[in-house]
Amino acid sequence: MNAHEGLLADFGEALRGARPSHVSQAEIAKVLGVGRTSVTGWEGGRFLPTLPHLYKAALYLDLQDEILEDLVSKWTRAKIAQAVGGTLVQIRREVQS
């Protein structure tokens, strides 16, 4: 697993953990106007939701600020790694070498 995949997995685990067990992926998908497979992909760490989808899901789930901040932080790190092909730590190491 590369760094980007690890960050996606971290985000997915955090998102899955934030969803109460009585709320289904299908329910979240319906509220967000996406397919259930999208929510499955997000929680499975295969790809990221858009930031508006993340915020809308957080509002629907009535997440505490700390949980939302953690999700946004993980989302941001994964998005940066996706865009630049690695984590900031990896990029710093390459620049310093």
Image: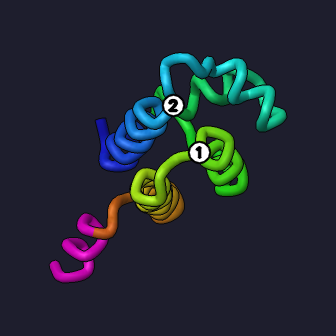
- Pointer 1 residue: 62
User: Which mark's residue is nearer the viewer, 1 or 2?
Assistant: 1
Depicted 73 relative to depicted 50: above or below: below
Tell me which residue sits at (62%, 18%) in the image.
24
Q: Position of residue 71 (x, y in %)?
A: 46, 52
Tell me if 60 is positioned left or right of 80 in this view.
right
Callout 1: SS: loop
- Seen from this angle, which residue lies furthest bottom? 96
Calculate the distance from the C-alpha at mark 1 to the C-alpha at mark 2. Answer: 10 Å
Q: Left or right: 87 with respect to 22?
A: left
Q: In which quarter of the image is residue 86?
A: bottom left
Q: In this view, does 9 lie above or below 83?
A: above
| Amino acid type shown at disc 2 | Arg
Quadrant occupied by the N terminus: top left
On screen, residue 91 above or below 33: below
Residue drawn at (33%, 42%) of the image? 6
Residue 93 located within the stretch drawn in magenta: yes
Q: Which amino acid does label 1 sit on?
A: Asp
Viewer can see residue 85: no
Badge 2 element = loop
Q: Residues within 10 Å of mark 2 (few under 14, many from 20)?
A: some
Q: Position of residue 93 (x, y in %)?
A: 19, 72
Question: Which residue is identified by label 2?
Answer: 19
Quarter occupied by residue 9: top left
> Which mark identifies residue 96?
none
Pointer 1 or 2: first along the chain: 2
Relative to the observer, which residue lies in front, 24 or 3? 24
Bounds of the magenta segment? 89-97
- Left or right: 33, with 72 as reference point: right
* Quarter that holds the C terminus: bottom left
Quick check: is 86 in the magenta stretch? Answer: no
Of residues 7 and 66, which is closer to you in this image? 66
